[in-house]
Amino acid sequence: MNEHVSTQLDRVLTQKARLGIMSILMVMQETDFNYLKDKLKLTDGNLSTHLSLLEKEKFIRLRKIFVQKKPKTLCQITERGRRDFLAYMDTLEKIIKDIPHK
Amino acid sequence: MIDQKKQRALENIALIKDMVTESRKELHYSGGGWIAIIWGLYSLLGYAGQRLFALAKLYDWEGLWWMALSAPAFFLTVLVIRKKAKTQSAKLRSTLIRAFLLFWIPLLMLITVLIVFCLVLADLPDHYLVPFILLVVSTGYLMLGFLFQRSILIMGLIGFAGTVIVTLLLIEQASLLLSLLFGIGLIVTGLVLNRKR
């Protein structure tokens, strides 16, 4: 199970930006598009691409709302995203522990 | 190959750690530092104005001065909250709104009732007005401090203890001492909160 999860997340999180998005959402649970753009210093297009991929993999959920008639995109981590990210963290720790020092 | 894998794992952990630490700081920072500074200056300016009106024997203006000063203080507070809300996560925003409604609305109601009592009830001398208001405000800081920030909790404890001591021992100098205590205390709290950010 863990190996499968880690492989899947490893593939998705090869990009530092996606790793950053998931890390922020692990703490914030839900945040808006502009907040992520500001924190990760990404362009609109770039961030959209990363978010779409994470949504496609069901790690996050995107929803649009209107605040004072202006559209706002909210990004929320899913239960699966949270669980798999924790498993991914375990895998990273194992990699570091398992490899013997020279 | 193994070293590469380990190197990548280390880099990813470092990135996750940075992001999580920064997000946690952001989650706990609500613009409270600037708000504390605004209300600290309000206390000091309020007392300075009150003294000037007293020296000019314009006693009716003392209360009006405090009320007039409250308007820009509230306006600036709302401005700070609005500015912060633009970049805040929805989770933090709802937490702060809940905290505000939970603590400050009932406390503001209590302050209003105490002010009315002091003005209406002849048995209640109006020099107890300032200690009453500040005890309620300190209670608010204590509650918020327990929930969010140790600096606010310390301000609440100092404010509460200071108000009790001044009321029991130095009631004649209450306005001066408590304005200084809350003015300087809030500015220091604000600076600490801003530095911790």
Image: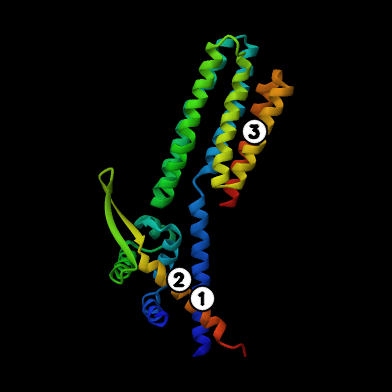
Q: Tag 2: residue type?
A: Leu
Q: Nearer the viewer, mark 1 or mark 3?
A: 3
Of all chains, the one bearing label 2 is: A
x and y, in percent, of residue B24 in the image: 51, 57
Q: Is residue B125 visible?
A: yes
Dot 3 crowding, Cα within 10 Å, few <14, some 14–19, many 20+: many
Is disc 1 on the same chain as disc 2?
no
The residue tagged 1 is: B11
Q: Nearer the viewer, mark 2 or mark 1?
A: 2
Of all chains, the one bearing label 1 is: B
x and y, in percent, of residue B1 in the image: 49, 90
Q: Tag 1: residue type?
A: Glu
Q: Secondary structure at mark 1?
A: helix
Q: CA distance from mark 2 to mark 1?
A: 17 Å
Is disc 3 on the same chain as disc 1?
yes
x and y, in percent, of residue B36 in the image: 56, 38
Q: Quadrant of residue B140?
A: top right
The residue tagged 2 is: A86
Q: Residue at x 44, y 37 (%)?
A: B101
Of residue A82 and residue B88, the one placed in the foreground of this image is: A82
Q: Is residue B64 visible?
A: no
Q: Does label 1 or label 3 sit earlier along the sequence?
A: 1
Of residue B62 and residue A6, the one placed in the foreground of this image is: A6
Q: CA distance from mark 2 to mark 3?
A: 43 Å
The residue tagged 3 is: B160
Dot 2 crowding, Cα within 10 Å, few <14, some 14–19, many 20+: some
Dot 1 crowding, Cα within 10 Å, few <14, some 14–19, many 20+: some
Q: Secondary structure at mark 2?
A: helix
Is disc 3 on the same chain as disc 2?
no
